[in-house]
Amino acid sequence: MGENTLPRTVALLGVRLTSQRLPHKALRLVRGRLALEHILERLDRAATVDEVVVCTSDEPVDDALADAAEQLGRPCFRGKGDDVLCRFYEAARLYGADLVVRALGDNLFPCTEHLDRQVRRHAAEGADWSTTDGLPWGMKAEVISFSALERAYRCAEDTSDSCDLTWFFDQPEVFRVLRLDAEPDCLRPDYRLTMDTPEDLVFLRALCERLDKDPSAISIREIVALLDASPDLAAINREVPDRFHDPVYRARVNTRILDTPRR
């Protein structure tokens, strides 16, 4: 794990057990093992990542996550619940991250091939925040420079509801934003591979059964080929609405970054 020529890169897996649509999603079973375990093993495959850390809250409801991480022999950081910006900043500082890969417990299939390319470009271009557009929903990750994470933590007007960190950093007038495009044969933004509803879980389990492989070893091109050839499978969760694209929800989250630190 990790490449000596790159800044120290730590993947923080933001995960909790509270969810209105699919509670305890990270502890659901997929092919007989915890979704959490599959996600961690996929992140292990990233050549540019030096360490992978479970990053959950210090609230009692998430004790089971901390227990699961311990049983898996994985480092676990516990911090504030809905103040994810604070939790990620404190975890990144503790683990000495120069670059942070933000991964999510909703996403069973982070694409490490695109992630590695993204980390290298992020470092080479001195970006603050980067993403890869056009991948199936749930396969991309975000890369955040620690300096940008610290600036957001200290200068954001309100971090109390910062679960969707994307909105805090995807502000080109404030941060150096780098947007990459997915490889042409992987451009499938309409496919939904996140795990946020019961329909999503049915879909992901069915996908893994049809491919008959451990989820950590399934490539993006295998997934794309299967879904292209199986409209019935792709249709299972196609109609699920994404909260991320809900303008009402977005409008109530204050992502303003102040010119001077508030703390």
Image: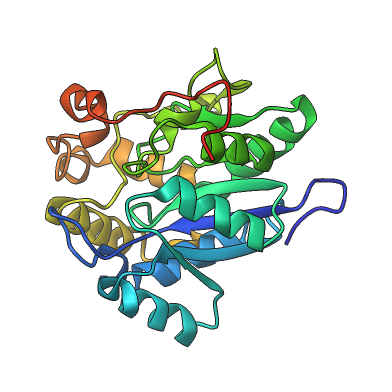
Above or below — where is 8 with respect to 177?
Answer: below
Residue farthest along the top direction in this orientation: 173
> Which residue occupies 54% across, 76% down?
74
Residue farthest along the front direction in this orientation: 263
Percent position of residue 132, x then y: 52, 30
Residue farthest along the right direction in this orientation: 5
Front residue of this view, candidates 108 and 59: 59
Percent position of residue 153, x then y: 53, 40
Examine the image and state in which quarter residue 152 appears. Answer: top right
Front residue of this view, candidates 252 and 225: 252
> Which residue occupies 15% across, 39% down?
235
Residue 113 showing in the rendered view: yes
Q: With 75 as the anchor, is 95 left or right in this view?
A: right
Percent position of residue 23, x then y: 18, 63
Residue 214 showing in the rendered view: no
The C terminus sits in image quarter: top right
Percent position of residue 241, x then y: 15, 34
Above or below — where is 49 with respect to 26?
Answer: above
Front residue of this view, candidates 215 and 27: 27
Front residue of this view, candidates 61 and 223: 61
Examine the image and state in which quarter residue 1 appears. Answer: bottom right
Structure colour scheme: rainbow
